[in-house]
Image: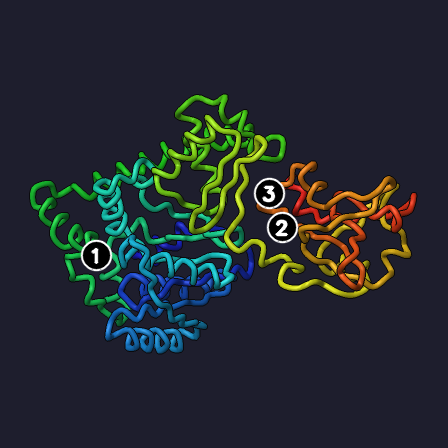
Amino acid sequence: MDLFEQFMRGFPKLEDFSRIEVGLSGGLDSVVLLHLLARAARQHRFDLRAVHVHHGLSENADIWAGFCQNLCSRLNIPLRVVRIQIEQDGSGIEAAARKQRYRVFADGLSDIVALAHHQDDQAETFLLAAVRGGGLRGLAAMPVWRNLNSQTRIWRPLLEFGRCDLAAYAEEQGLDYVEDESNADNRFLRNWFRNEVLPHWQLRIPSVQRHILANIRSLQQDLALLDQVIEADYQDICSDGFFDIAKWRASDDLRRRHVLLHFLRSHDVTAPQAVVHEMERVLLQAEQGEWRLPQADIYAYRNRLRLLPKGWEHRLPWTEKPLKGRLQTILQTAGFVLKPHPNGLSEAALHQQGMIRTFHTGDHIAQAYGSKTVGKILQEAHVLPAVRRHWPVLADVSGQHCLAVANFRTDCNQSAEEGWWPVYEPFQAFY
């Protein structure tokens, strides 16, 4: 059975017209993967594309991009070439480049990103995890499938093939590819394992790679079982719709840490071990806590653990500048829901001109007996402090007079017995 037949034997069932984007470097592995998928597309209904990430790290980078463009033109496959600048963050140039690549993959809006990692890559990944302290998840190396984000999955269909299998296929099919000169640079640990360590071990133990791969398969099964247990724990802790710190504290030591890591992973957030240990220590002892990570800020407040992605407030339509117009229209445009309520806004109030803006210090709203500051209303509702300053307030056309505090209160002079309560449902998670 040739490589293409083996490849097709394990081909997944895809939704018709699924969009698959191949990460194409121009090297042997990705060229073979693109060619295999181009052949597979004749038998299956999917939309095949490719992306080349131009790192700009080699003097040959433009040549590689041109090679990929020519290859995709010959195969009639759309290609996007994305130029990036590597931002050093202390993790090393390889890790920084990898982070940038995955950002590019996520930006492609495809259903599946196909990557050309193979058995040799898998063995190297295991060894890297072993010397760097990657734990069970690191030693389990690369899964065939994993989620990149909520809409895109990573697929590695070549993990059952070796580099020699791909080279033989390329020769058989007459495929050209480029050679990245950095692959010969043994200053990079992965290259040292590939070029020096594994060949030396294979002289003494010819089956060493086969044993490593068998260990990876076993570890992946163990990890899958662990993930099922931790997912069940996590669902129990979040059964009331939020991460319940009291329930988490009641777990045993080992499960607590794994659930905390699962909470971070479920939000696509990574944290150094020291930060996770500090979070665990604070959550066990204190009522409140705050941690600022590169991808998100995490808050412990009133028995709830919450995560806010970096820049979340800039996605709110009223934070950059007030939304102005007829109140009912701008509320609906901004994604608010108007719910029937005995003290809600009257029809006349909703039809007047006004604005949605963020809460200002000093804002107050008329009540049946006097008035109340908006800050006090948010505090009494136990709104997460970091969210309060971005809370939406409905105001009159001048912006000075508050007509309603979204989700909580309306001006008694603007309300009706059969009125409408303006609710921004995504913010219900913050109180």
* The quadrant where residue 217 appears: top left
CA gap between label 3 and label 2 equals 8 Å
Q: At x 40% / y 70%, what residue is drawn? A: 82
First reached walking from the N terminus: tag 2 or tag 1: 1
Structural crowding at the residue carrying mark 3, measured as other residues with C-alpha within 10 Å and reported as few (<14), some (14–19) or many (≥20)? some
| Image quarter of the C terminus | top right
Residue type indicated by callout 1 = Cys
Structural crowding at the residue carrying mark 2, measured as other residues with C-alpha within 10 Å and reported as few (<14), some (14–19) or many (≥20)? some
Residue type indicated by callout 3 = Pro
First reached walking from the N terminus: tag 1 or tag 3: 1
Q: Which residue in the structure is indicated by mark 3?
A: 385
Residue 1 in view, yes or no: no
Q: Secondary structure at mark 3?
A: helix
Q: At x 45% / y 37%, what residue is drawn? A: 262
CA gap between label 2 and label 1 equals 59 Å
Up the image or down, 404 lies above or below 260; here it is below
User: Number of numbered discs present?
Assistant: 3
Q: How is the image coloured?
A: rainbow
Instruction: Give residue 413's position: percent from left, percent from top.
Output: 89, 49
Q: At x 28% / y 57%, what residue is drawn? A: 94
Q: Which residue in the structure is indicated by mark 1?
A: 164
Q: Nearer the viewer, mark 2 or mark 1?
A: 2
**Closer-to-camera residue (157/297):** 297
Could you tell whether 172 is left or right of 361 in the image? left
Q: Which mark is residue 243?
A: none
Residue type indicated by callout 2 = Arg
Instruction: Give residue 112's position: percent from left, percent from top.
Output: 47, 57
Instruction: Give residue 66's position: percent from left, percent from top.
Output: 33, 78
**Closer-to-camera residue (420/41):** 420
Q: Which residue in the structure is indicated by mark 2?
A: 389
Up the image or down, 327 lies above or below 146; here it is below
